[in-house]
Structure formats: C-alpha cells, structure tokens
Amino acid sequence: MTPSQRLARAKRLVTVQEQMRRVAERDLAATRRDIASTEADRAALLQTLAGERMAGLFLDAAAGRLRRIAETATALGARATAQERTVLARGLSEKQAERWAEGLARAHRAEEDRREALEQLDLLIARGGGLDDGETPASRKPGALSGS
C-alpha cells in the first residue's frame, strides 16, 4: 500500500469515526429527552394527585403508574450512562484516528519533500553543477563551486 493510499484510508477512517461519534451523541441526546419527558410525567402525576380531593380512590392506580415511571426512569438512566461511555469511547477513537492520519500526512509530506529535493539535485547534476569526476564533497575546497 502506497503512502497516498494509506493517507486516503486514514482520512476515510477519521470520517467514519466522526460519523459514529455523532450518532452516539444523537442517541444520548434522545435518551436525555426521554428522561426529561419521564420526569415531567412523574411531576404531572404528583401534581394531579396533590390537587385532587378524590385522589384516594385512584391511589392504587397512581402508585402503579408512579412505579412504572420510576422503572422507566431507572432504565433510561442506565441507558444514558452506557451511551455516555460510548460517546467518550467514540470521541477517543476519533482523536486517535485523527492523530494517525496527521502522522501519515506528515510522513507523506516529508516523502514528497525528499522526492522533490532529489529531483532538484538530479537537475543540478544534469546541468553540470555537480562534483567533478573523482571529487567528493569532503575533497572540495570550501567556497569553491565547480564550473565557475
């Protein structure tokens, strides 16, 4: 796999990780709305019971309804906790993928820079700006340019 292909793959992975995090955040927000709705139902039922003179007649039904609301709230709370952990894990995975992609991008840029430098060196040598036959960089006198 070439560096360009690895970089493209890393970018796709970052995009997928970002989408997965957004889905997890959306699910958590929906659960939190459900929790608020359940709490509003409980408060409304308690308000109704507090204001009714005949509440004693419906006490068993109200108690059953309050129990179901409490069970729903407990289940929603557990689901929200699990979803919060999922959002955190997705966020960490996204950041890890981003760091990986950034590292690959830096390596890709460094490879391109190295390739460009080698091309420039090849062009310089082809124009005669290179070393004379038998001359090495160490044997060249400081400040002396060949061909000048």
Image: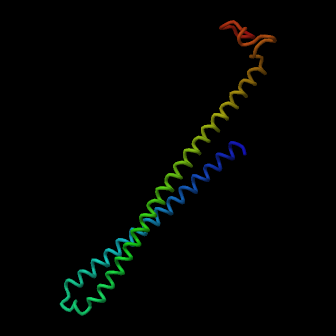
Across and down, in percent, residue 11 comes to: 60, 50
Residue shown at the point (71%, 10%) measured from the top left: 138
If the image is split into quadrants, where does the N terminus sit?
top right
Q: Pick out the residue farthest to the right.
A: 133
Colour treatment of the image: rainbow
If the image is split into quadrants, where does the C terminus sit?
top right
Q: Is residue 83 left or right of residue 47?
A: right
Q: Is residue 87 left or right of residue 61?
A: right
Residue shown at the point (55%, 47%) measured from the top left: 98
Nearer to us in this view, 112 or 123: 112
| Picture mark count | 0
Q: Pick out the residue farthest to the top.
A: 141
Nearer to us in this view, 36 or 72: 72
> Where is 126 relative to 62, above or below?
above
Q: Is residue 125 left or right of residue 81?
A: right
Across and down, in percent, residue 26 comes to: 46, 65
Picture quarter containing residue 54? bottom left
> Where is 74 relative to 67, above or below?
above
Residue shown at the point (44%, 61%) measured from the top left: 84
Across and down, in percent, residue 71 comes to: 37, 77
Across and down, in percent, residue 14 comes to: 57, 52
Nearer to us in this view, 113 or 65: 65
Residue shown at the point (39%, 76%) measured from the top left: 72
